[in-house]
Image (spheres, rainbow, N blue to C red):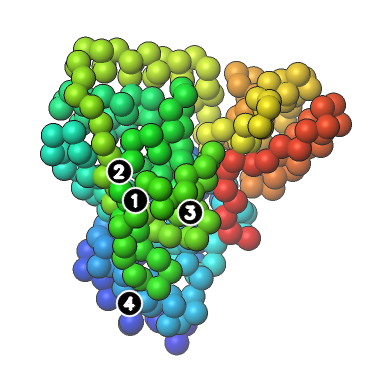
Amino acid sequence: MNFKELIENNLKLTSSKIYFDEPMKKHTTFKIGGCADCLIKVDNIEDLHSIVDFTNKNNIPLTIMGNGSNVLVLDSGIRGIVVKINIQKLEINENKVTVGAGNKNIEIAQELLKHELKGFEEISGIPGTIGGAIRMNAGAHGKEIKDLVKTVTVMDSNGNIKQMSKNELQFEYRNSIIAKEKLIVLEVVLELQKGNKEEIQSKMKEYATWRKEKQPLEYPNAGSTFKRGENFITAQLIDECGLKGYKIGGAEISTKHAGFIVNTGNATAKDVIELTNYIKEKVYEKFQKKIQLEIEILGE
């Protein structure tokens, strides 16, 4: 029995959709990456549990992703099963907001605006899902998602489900216990405050304008390529090395923001990796600073 038959004959799902030999460039904001052997868009917890159980029993590699906004998939693709989390939920009870891991940040922000709840404006423009934002403790404009979290419901690699408090999540700069222990975010409870609709909308517009002016949104990219240093701003060092506009293949250091690598049309993962290595080398040469990737590399 081949891989496809094994899945089709043994994996019983209620509503989630299965794709074989699926090009990952269709599922990442970088628009780069080879094919996944199998990609499943999962829209409920029961199906996710079935997949985790199935991959464990059959020793099949399992990769979890959200909207693909902070990842680089390598050119040979991803073996095994890729699960794209699309679990949707949005419930508002006074200042408590319960959202599914697959809800997109911008959609959550629009709903909070309708209910005049403030605190999420800075996060509103971060591309991707709330699950991904929680996993990496995403942040912008001086705020991180951890500032709003009350509890997160997760599934571990054995399919066990538990609710974790903010303290248990061990949030750090662009990291959390979820990333370290490969937990899967299912649901998030946020705690917000009542606000003024016009003020919330004004802040959201202000941050959206800032992103448009400062970030290369006109090209596919994976967000900020490198993490901020402890005592330096990485993009500034890259800029001071005179690297804006430097290109390898179809991958280019943005002329608008040195912290971004963009896909100018036909970039491969190999181009991006070579370019990030070149940047690391040049920054170390000039400043003796070691810089670290913020984007996650998936596949082979």
Q: Residue at x 68, y 27 (%)?
A: 231
Counting residues from the N terminus, which is met first, the one under dot 3 or under dot 2? 2
Q: In the picture provided, is 95 more to the left or to the right than 171? A: left
Q: Are marks 4 and 3 in contact (CB under 8 Å)?
A: no
For residue 150, which numbered disc appears in the image? Answer: 2
Q: Nearer the viewer, residue 253 or 135?
A: 135
Q: Which residue is mark 1?
A: 165
Query: Considering only vertical position in the picture, is 244 above or below 68?
Result: above
SS of the residue at dot 1? strand
Question: What x and y, as percent, mark residue 61?
Answer: 51, 70
Could you tell me the amino acid type at mark 4? Answer: Leu
Q: Position of residue 123 (x, y in %)?
A: 38, 30
Mark 4 — residue?
A: 11
Does dot 2 land on a helix, a strand or a loop?
A: strand
Q: Amino acid at mark 1?
A: Ser
Amino acid type for the residue under numbered disc 3: Ile
Dot 1 or dot 2: first in sequence order is 2
Q: Residue at x 26, y 57 (%)?
A: 43
